Amino acid sequence: MEPSKEATKLVAAVMYLAFALEAGAGNTLTLGDDYPARLRASSTVQALTAEDAFGDKLGLYTGSLEFLQTDLVLRGTPGLDIEISRKLTVGSQGGTRFFSDWDLAIPSVHGVFSQQGGWNSGLGGRNFNRCSKYAWPADEVVLGEAPTRPRPERQAMSEEFWHGTFLYLPGVGEEEILKVQDNARPRPSNGGAYPLTTKSGAIIRCIPINGGAEEGFEVLTPTGITYQFSFMVKRVELPIVTFGPQPGGNSNTTPTRFVLQRADHRLFPVIARDRFGNSLSYEWDAPTGQLRRISASDGRSVEFSYSGTRISQIRADGRTWNYDYPSGVLTTVTLPDQSYWSFTPGLTMSFEAAGNVPALRAFCNNPGVPTYDSVASMRHPSGATATFTITPTLHGRSYEHYSCSAQPNTALFRETMETYPARFYAWSLTKKAVSGPGLPSPYVWTYNYGPHNACYVSGLPAGDPMTCKANAPAEKQVEVVEPSGTTVRHVFSNKSDHSEGYPLRIERPGSVQITSYEFGDPSQFPLYAGTSIMPAAGRGWYLSRINPLRERSTIQDGVKSTWRVNAFDVLARPVSITESSTAQP
């Protein structure tokens, strides 16, 4: 299932070395700096149990942190509520969002592409049939910043600037769009062609937009809601900087700098409808790309006002929500009853210099140099305050395959990049503290992600410290110290295969919970939800595998309680379950 295109392009990469140098003033990225965006693990972002009043969602495998805060909901028919929520991903880079550093959590189909080529398909030559010819974008030719004429050129491979194309649905999250595999899953019998799908089961067909010059997407969700994505909004992203030899090929002198400008391309919906004809309409202003109104067929509506590019006010049912940006980022959200959210900067990092990325100057077999911690707080309308500490943290994959864009004896080896890095830095939550009315002392959680346990099973000499030794660990431990002082150990697979990021055990004082998944091919459901086109580092061919929970058992007080699936249906849903308990010696 591994794409062959990346392997072919790696040969070309040797001609021009991708430099992982520090991102000067913080307004560019090198390929090494961009590792966290390229790497995707199969762990999902999870809620923090009952203590998530601030909308914080934590992916414990790497400590990734995201916030989702709902300001208003106008209830309607199932699946067609008008919900206005704000979304912030810690460490997100670049872009001008609806609420500055926070985004509006509405459905979208999106990806990051080059500014010069736009959202195109590279299948059969550059074109804008981005749905019917769904593929990675075409490579780009980038001119070097050199005083000589003609200016030198280099070919930027698509995986240098593009990390996949995704569907975002509230309540589901981000999923890669996959090519449908023949006989993989049941499809509608309405006569329509649905060439694309997602792991959760949404199916997608192509629709013409811009007078037929381009294609958009029509998405039918498993809940029966159909979205038409046809309104394009482009947002500037941080550019990618690479370096190559000066004209004449001498790379031992000052190299030529190549800057590839990028943009986040998003197709937003214009209408959502259910099978009974109920609908939501999204009204957009074409010149500005601003959402002006969401209205329902039953009369519900929400209107938006802007200050420049940012939403400044929302009105619904005679009530008003106000959004203030005195420092350029969202600082205060005032609700209709005059209670409010307030925020300190620091969670996005996008306006800071070296803090754009968790580490700098990465190259082959070297994860780089970490930047610095960030501490930010937010106040809940109830008066409670939460403070979050985000730390550049080294994580790892075991049994990885070493693959570098150049050989160790190549000039300027420190400017190379790996296809599958075993070690990488990421922004990780290391401490959360909540204080406020009714709490005699702050509630504090701390997070320790343990040793990275990274190693390479091939590609390096046997004596290299990073070569996997006999019985090398294939898992990692994350320890959480709860406000009560109890330490809970979460154990994940960190093996570089389809099991990466899956939780294996939760160890508490006096109890252990063990989980196992169906990683084989049980012939009861397709092995893959579809075909991934994600670049190699994203591991899309692993993430698209269907690995349902097979068994969960808990050992406590001398008793083992087990929940086990005996059989699945074609959609990998349990159809036969056994629950049992046995005494333990």
Image: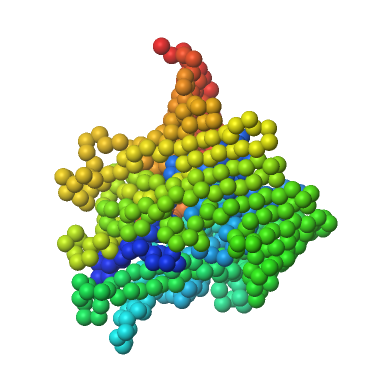
Q: Which residue corresponds to the image point at 64% horizontal and 68% vertical from the top-left?
A: 309
Q: In front: 159, or 547?
A: 159
Q: Quadrant of residue 584?
A: top left
Q: Which residue corresponds to the image point at 40% horizontal and 39% vertical from the top-left?
A: 449
Q: Quadrant of residue 10?
A: bottom left
Q: How many marks?
A: 0
Vertical arrangement, residue 298 with respect to residue 259, above or below:
above
Vertical arrangement, residue 137 with respect to residue 356, above or below:
below
Q: In front: 171, or 115?
A: 115
Q: Tell me residue 74's x, y (percent).
A: 76, 51
Q: Is residue 454 left or right of residue 490?
A: left
Question: Does residue 122 show up?
Answer: no
Q: Tell me residue 3's x, y (percent).
A: 36, 58
Q: Tell me residue 551's x, y (percent).
A: 47, 29
Which image quadrant: the C terminus?
top left
Q: Which residue corresponds to the image point at 34% horizontal and 42% vertical from the top-left?
A: 452
Q: In front: 387, or 530?
A: 387
Q: Tell me residue 571's x, y (percent).
A: 53, 43
